[in-house]
Amino acid sequence: KDQMTYCGAFWSFAQMLNQASLADVVREEIVSAVRYATVGHEINKQAVGEAGLIRALVAILHPGPNEGSMRVKQEVAACLRIACDESESNSQEMVKCSGISGLLELMATGPLQAKEEAIAAISNACLAYSKNLEYVTAKARADLQEITFSPQFGDEVKLYAKCIQIAWNSTRNR
């Protein structure tokens, strides 16, 4: 893990993910490597943002030439959950590239595991940089309210959903 930043791997990964012709299986492996390298490693987490990987990851969520399969999108959400956790700079980058809207779309249309990862990523991004809350729509807030009472979702995801709601309400009560 320690050598990922120093050898320029994150920059190379960003360049690769920006290639529209890249196969989904390769995208998934790159995203998995980034996720693994950032868990519990603050230097790597910072390098992910500096290398432009937040934008490259978010591009996979949105329709367009770099859009990934549902499986890759789920892995992207998991990676963004880690990258934005207590990282203001990475979470700020989410505002610049419409990261929250991409995650909200995944939350609305993805399978259960993708929804769970998207909710966790939204929560971490919003808690690290409150401007992200502006992009959590009324429909999404209603969906999050339903999720907090749904037996379909685990306690951890319900907590993430509740955190988004509390953060949103606290910014409106100022």
Image (tube, grey):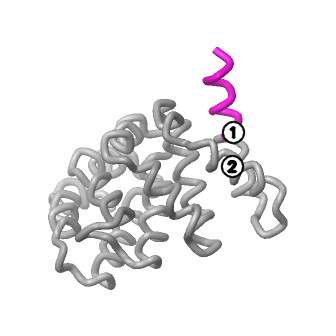
Q: Position of residue 7 (x, y in %)?
A: 15, 60
| Residue type marked 1 | Gln
The three-letter code of the residue at mark 2 reads: Ala
Label 2: element kind = helix
Disc 1 vs disc 2: Cβ atoms closer than 8 Å? yes
Say left or right for 22 vs 114: left
Residue named by callout 1: 165
Residue shown at the point (46%, 77%) measured from the top left: 70
Q: Quadrant of the C terminus?
A: top right
Q: Does residue 140 appear left or right of residue 28 in this picture?
A: right
Separation (CA) of disc 1 from disc 2: 6 Å
The quarter of the picture where the N terminus appears is bottom left
**Where residue 132 appears, x then y in whole percent?**
47, 37
| Looking at the image, residue 65 lies above or below residue 81 | below
For the residue pair 103 and 88, the one nearer the viewer reads as 103
Residue at 31% x, 47% y: name it. Answer: 97
- Write down the region rendered in magenta: 165-174
Is 38 left, or right, of 142 in this rendering?
left
Is 13 colored magenta in this rendering? Answer: no
Q: Residue furthest top?
A: 174
Q: Which residue in the structure is indicated by mark 2?
A: 161
Mark carried by residue 85: none
Q: What residue is rendered at 64% in x and 72% in y?
A: 112
Instruction: Determine the image quadrant of residue 153.
Output: bottom right
Q: Name the quadrant containing residue 124.
A: top right
Residue drawn at point x = 73 percent, y = 44 percent: 162
> Where does the image place residue 41, in percent across and percent down from the top left?
40, 51
- Could you classify mark 1 by the number of other residues whose Cα lies within 10 Å: few (under 14), some (14-19), or many (20 or more)? many
Name the residue nearer the viewer: 111 or 42: 111
Work out which residue is located at the far front of the displayed protein and give it: 139
